Image (tube, grey):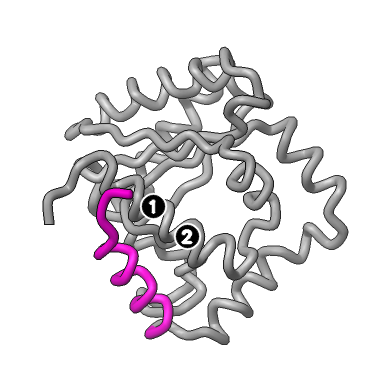
Amino acid sequence: MKYTNATYIAQTRCWLENVVLRHNLCPFAHKPFNAGQIRYVVTDSARPEFLLEDLLNELESLRATPVEETETILLIHPNTLEDFLDYNDFLDVVDALLADGGFEGEFQVASFHPDYQFADTQPDDAENYTNRSPWPMLHLIREDSLEKAIASYPGADAIPERNVETMNTLGTQHHQAVLENCLQTTEE
């Protein structure tokens, strides 16, 4: 399959629809998805330092864009940090960028990776699929929007525990099949 930016986006949208939205892993994702307020960005950065530059540019872009136009950004980076341990280490650099760049308190960055593994889990544990995506990506989130969504959602504190239960009930084979299916998606 030829991978173009449109293909990466189509595969990411497939995952978003069939995992995150279908299983309500993030109850706050429905509104921006349905309103077309998610910006999908594919970077061809092949080195972490270039990805960091792209992340900085996207944070600045999100800051300059009205929330009504773009609520959130998914920065898809298929050509760098394919190894989960390297990706996980990179998240410390992301946190430093948020602090040093004056973005702390304004934005958060959530992490997704094809090999995502939470601490104290085994690689094949189904609960890891809450953060397993077709491609490595960084999710740029406006903190104000997140705080408002959490305040208006009863039981928001129970979301992570509920997600683990949902993923474990569905099982690893189910999640693997969904991801494999999404990876067959071509341009829309």
Q: Which residue is mark 1?
A: 12
CA gap, disc 2 to disc 1? 12 Å
Rendered image: mark on residue 128: none
The percent position of residue 117, horizontal first and vertical second, equals: 41, 65
Instruction: Name above or below for residue 97 compared with residue 5.
Output: above
- Indicate which disc, 2 or 1, sits on the residue closer to the N terminus: 1
Q: Is residue 154 left or right of residue 141?
A: right
Residue type at mark 2?
Answer: Asn
Start-end of magenta stretch: 173-188
Place residue 41 in its image quadrant. top left
Instruction: Name above or below for residue 166 compared with residue 9.
Output: below
The percent position of residue 8, horizontal first and vertical second, equals: 29, 47
Instruction: Name above or below for residue 175 compared with residue 30.
Output: below
Q: Is residue 158 left or right of residue 125?
A: right
Rendered image: mark on residue 131: 2
Assess disc 2: are there few (<14), some (14-19) or many (≥20) residues with their C-alpha within 10 Å of its C-alpha: some
